[in-house]
Image (spheres, rainbow, N blue to C red):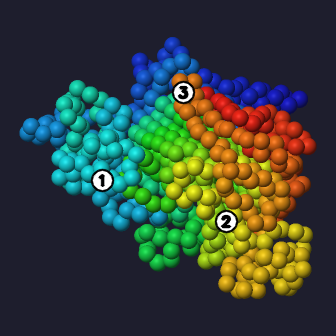
Amino acid sequence: MRKSFITAAMALFVTLGLSAREFHVAKTGSDQNDGSAASPFLTINKAAMVLRTGDTVIVHEGVYREWVQPRNSGADEYSRITYMAAPGEEVWIKGSEIVTGWVRQGKTDVWKVVLPNSFFKDFNPFAEPLVGDWLSQTNDAYVVGEVYLNNVSLFQSITREGVDNPVIPQNTRKAEQAKRAWYVEVTDTETTIWANFGAGVNPNKELVEVNARPACFFPALPGVNYITVKGFHMSAAATNWAPPTAFQQGLVGPHWSKGWVIEDNVISNSKCVGICIGKDRASGQNRWTIERELVGFNRELESIFQAEDMGWKKENIGSHIIRNNEIFDCEQAGIVGHLGGVFSTIEHNYIHDINAKRQYAGAEVGCIKLHAAIDCIIRNNILENGYNGLWLDWQGIGTRVTGNVFFNNDHTDIWTEVTHGPCLIDNNVLLSPNAFLEWGQGSAWVHNIISGYITFHPVTDRYTPYHYPHSTKIVGVMNFPGGDDRYFNNIFTIAPDSELKTKDAGTSVYDERPPFYEGIYRDLNTRKTDALPKSFVEQMAAGNSQSSRFQLAMRVGNNVYMNGVKHYAYEEGAVSTGADAKVSLEKTAEGIVLKITADNSINNVKTQTMGTDNLGKTYYSNGYFENPDGTKLQVDHDFFGNARNASSPKVGPFENLKTGENTFMVWKF
């Protein structure tokens, strides 16, 4: 009896001890305080030292110049640790420090400051070269440091003369900003910065800052799970290049953990990456760049198998939620990740002006750039003014891209590279001139507006993994002969003044791929041609086209092609019209408005509801287009969540699309 009483008392003590607590941080506080509302801490990191499962810290108005490093984990998605800005208060976390004492150099607009290296404590961003696999920069002249004037970054010059006469990079989107430049020299004891802040600007009377920390909110160690980061302005981090074969660090991110929620934040001015949901260091660290032996492709394969050996699976990694953030002025990616972002949801983010300065280049650049986006959902985001909008590279398996708007992206809106699918892309609006780069296979495009070109590119010299459905477990590896894609219920158009006209628009780029029917792969392997279209058989017999080799088949039907865009040669139910859709976007004070003009062709196409039952399964990865939990799905709701007509849904992303002019508010500020 006494033993039972002691056990019950201990259980009660533990329960009470683990009850949720609320702490406060304020600029008027002290880290010697108890963290209560009446006696707040001064730093967020002090709160991080005491927070435990279920606790919340509320941070009050002000600028906090610290690298917040969460130490303890929440227990699960229902009992997490929450870091949040006080409602209605503007709270900044900055990776920068203010610099004063600038000395003007003669009568020029150039100023100079000399900082002791102790100013930076144990991390001097101006002594850290920008480096990493797949970075095109071939020397170490660029560094992760940055100089800011009133929260806007200057351009780094790699020569002292370039500060007096700034060089505007080719293709930059920030030409005026490029006229303000800085140059740095670092010795064993001091860091000297020369900066041109522009005509008539006295930096000692403005807010001038320099990078001083590699992150704003990022655990020092992996495995800090179930953290919520909510409502902050976070800016000015000295992040390094984040390839899929190295430690990927962002201005904010979970550092190889599980179950983070990053929401309602404004994230800007990262040297490379805004939000990182990527790889750890232990499974590979820039070996391609450092060792100069095996190429990056091999090193990436190694990192995947090493991560699997180290416990990369759904129970340990990923399942993050990134929502309602604004992310801009990051020079590599707004959101990046490899392996660590599996099973995550990225929704309702406004990501813009990514890689806009264009001082250095490389792969891994995009508003969102993900490797291994297994069962990720990317929905209701605006992705604009980037180099790439969304780049899904390797293992985009079980990925769904739905209800997003892409525009003003220079290279492409969506790029799927060396991935086997299934990847469902539905209810999106793509308005950049280059809409889609298909360097993989196994994608399904349903109910989209595609106003741009499709580039189809088989990749037969790279073999990447495919996985069991809804799992990180690898089944095998295969290359990319191309095809195995689906296009149903889409609207294809192109700007009438486009230089390339209709040459590379629409699904006609797949004409050398056979149409799918049951048994086609058996027939192709045995060279039986009775069921194949005559024109395709003639191409095979001629032996002078890619159709003479084994190809993956296409499933294409019931799309509308406007303004002369051409359809797939073997498509059934295609409706073509010379009418111009006149698709355009306009930014207003309220939000982003889409306008589209449609003729009666939208009513002449015979559509059907598409989903798991009629999209089929992918050839190599043997996967169905289904929900992440394995249940069947149907694309039976439109861009706005409105139910579609079950028997004959409207083409394109909007169920209430009508003939004539249409206006849709696709984003509200």
Regarding mark 3 in the picture, which secondary structure is present there? loop
Which disc is residue 588 wearing? 3
- Label 2: how many Cα within 10 Å (few below 14, some 14–19, many 20+): some
Q: In this view, does 511 lie to the left or right of 124?
A: right
Q: Is residue 150 above or below residue 341?
A: above
Rendered location of residue 567, percent (x, y): 73, 60
Instruction: Find residue 330 and report its image quarter.
Output: top left
Nearest to the eye among marks 2 and 1: give it: 2
Residue situated in front as seen by the camera: 221 or 331: 331
Q: Is residue 251 above or below residue 666?
A: below
Determine the residue positioned at 46% across, 64% down.
133
Residue situated in front as seen by the camera: 177 or 232: 177
Residue 181 visible to an observer of this rendering: yes
Determine the residue positioned at 75% across, 50% down.
560
Regarding mark 2 in the picture, which secondary structure is present there? helix
Farthest-out residue, top: 38
- Label 3: how many Cα within 10 Å (few below 14, some 14–19, many 20+): few
- Between the residue at mark 3 and the residue at mark 2, the CA separation in whole angstroms equals 36 Å
- Between the residue at mark 2 and the residue at mark 1, the CA separation in whole angstroms equals 48 Å
Q: In this view, does 30 lie above or below 259?
A: above
Nearest to the eye among marks 3 and 2: give it: 2
Q: Is residue 536 left or right of residue 354?
A: right
Q: In this view, does 349 lie above or below 285?
A: above
Residue situated in front as seen by the camera: 346 or 609: 609
Q: Which amino acid does the dot numbered 1 rest on?
A: Ala
Where, quadrant-wise, is the N terminus in this rendering? top right
Q: Which amino acid does the dot numbered 3 rest on?
A: Thr
Regarding mark 1 in the picture, which secondary structure is present there? helix
Q: Which amino acid does the dot numbered 2 rest on?
A: Val
Q: Is residue 603 left or right of residue 379?
A: right
Which disc is residue 127 wearing? 1
Rendered location of residue 343, percent (x, y): 71, 49
